[in-house]
Image (spheres, helix red, strand yellow):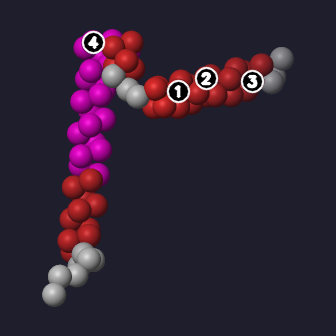
Amino acid sequence: MKTDYLVPEEDEEKEAQEEAHKHFVSLEFSHLVLTEGPTVALGLLSNEARTELSQSIINNYHKRLVEANSGL
C-alpha cells in the first residue's frame, strides 16, 4: 500500500533541496541583473511579479524618505 506522506527524514531532505534551489535561483537572478541589467531581468518576470517587486521598492523608498524628513 502506498502512502501519501513523507517520513520526517524525507521531508527534511525535500525542504533542504527546496532551500538550495531557491538560493541557486536567487544567485542566478542576481547574476542576470548584474550582467544584462535590471531592465532585462525585470522583463523576464511575470507582470504580477514585476508589479509586486516595484511596489516593494516604492514602499521602501517612501518609508526611508518619510524617516529622513521626520527630523526636519
Q: CA distance from mark 3 to mark 1?
A: 22 Å
- Discs 1, 2 touching: Cβ within 8 Å: no
Image mark count: 4
Where residue 47 appears, x then y in whole percent? Answer: 46, 26
Q: Which mark is residue 51?
A: 1
Query: Mark 3 or mark 1: which is in front?
Result: 1
Q: CA distance from mark 4 to mark 2?
A: 23 Å
Which residue, given by chain and number where applicable, does mark 2 sit on?
58
Graded by Cα atoms within 10 Å as few (under 14), some (14 to 19) or many (20 or more), the crowding at tag 2 reads few
Q: Which residues are magenta?
A: 19-38
Residue at 52% x, 26% y is 51
Judge left or right: residue 62 versus residue 24. Answer: right
Answer with mark 3 or mark 1, whichever residue precedes in sequence: 1
Q: Main secondary structure of the magenta part?
A: helix
Query: Mark 3 or mark 2: which is in front?
Result: 2
Query: Mark 1 or mark 4: which is in front?
Result: 1
28 relative to 11, above or below: above
Quadrant where the N terminus is found in the figure: bottom left
Which residue, given by chain and number where applicable, does mark 4 sit on?
36
Where residue 54 appears, x then y in whole percent? Answer: 53, 24
Q: CA distance from mark 3 to mark 2?
A: 12 Å
Report if residue 53 is visible in the image. no
Graded by Cα atoms within 10 Å as few (under 14), some (14 to 19) or many (20 or more), the crowding at tag 3 reads few
Residue at the right extreme?
Answer: 72
Kind of residue at disc 4 = Glu
Secondary structure under badge 1? Answer: helix
Q: CA distance from mark 1 to mark 2?
A: 10 Å
